[in-house]
Amino acid sequence: MIRLRGLDKCYREGDRDRVVLRDFSLDVAEGQRLALVGRSGSGKSTLLNLISGMDAPDAGGISVGGIRVDQLGERDRTLFRRRHIGFVFQFFNLIPTLTVRENLMLPLQLLGRTGALAGAPAMELLAQVGLADRGDSFPEQLSGGEQQRVAIARALIHRPRVLLADEPTGTLDEETGALVLTLLDELTAAHGMTVVMVTHSPEVAARMDRVIRLVDGRPVEV
């Protein structure tokens, strides 16, 4: 599902370049759940941004579901993300001025699905994450665990081929985090989604099918 070949990525810091990824190559099979671990600044979040097309590599190739993401223009990368990628962030990133239901409907509306074509799937997925009665609530009225469940539902509502998660339990307590992970496992497995998750938690990484540690800009199989 994901094929990375010879990726280089560096950022300018003051008067020097900081190399984040160096000749990075990795394959992720369809339906596989992969954990990315490593010290802060090792390139884990950068790798998610490259896979999703939010950033472009300095060199190398990125293929997701047979689509050469690195060869797409900016507009086509945006359309690619809307159709094929789901993203779950550490800090939820829900839109505070929209209700829970409206937050869920937004990805479908961006794909041209409006009215009942967006509203019905939103309510169905809210029921699956145990929040059927909170559709008219605003994000600030929910607990952290509830907000993350909404964020997971929003990431999955358009049935993406790949789910990218950046420390999805990083702000949650241990018990709530475990419940959120179980929900994430169940929903992605039900649709055979490929998952790439950044985490600092050994317990979270142990739940995945495969663990890759980023060391000096390259992948090391754990």
Image (tube, rainbow, N blue to C red):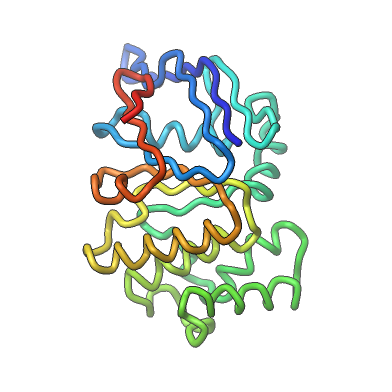
- Tell me the quarter of the image containing the N terminus: top right
In the image, is residue 126 above or below residue 191? below
Q: Residue 6 placed where, x, y %?
A: 51, 15
In this image, 167 relative to 115: left or right?
Answer: left
Residue drawn at x 68%, y 24% is 71
**Residue 119 location, quadrant:** bottom right
- Tell me the quarter of the image containing the C terminus: top left
**Residue 156 location, quadrant:** bottom right
Q: Residue 2 placed where, x, y %?
A: 57, 33
Residue drawn at x 24%, y 68% is 175
Q: Residue 77 placed where, x, y %?
A: 66, 37
In this image, 199 relative to 135: left or right?
Answer: left
In this image, 101 relative to 143: left or right?
Answer: right
In depth, the one of 63 and 71 nearer the eye is 63
Instruction: Name, please, the residue furthest toward the bottom.
Output: 133
In this image, 94 relative to 72: left or right?
Answer: left
In depth, the one of 75 and 90 nearer the eye is 90
In depth, the one of 121 and 18 nearer the eye is 121
Residue drawn at x 33%, y 12% is 16
Total residue callouts: 0
Residue drawn at x 45%, y 32% is 47
Q: Residue 3 placed where, x, y %?
A: 57, 27
In depth, the one of 73 and 208 nearer the eye is 208
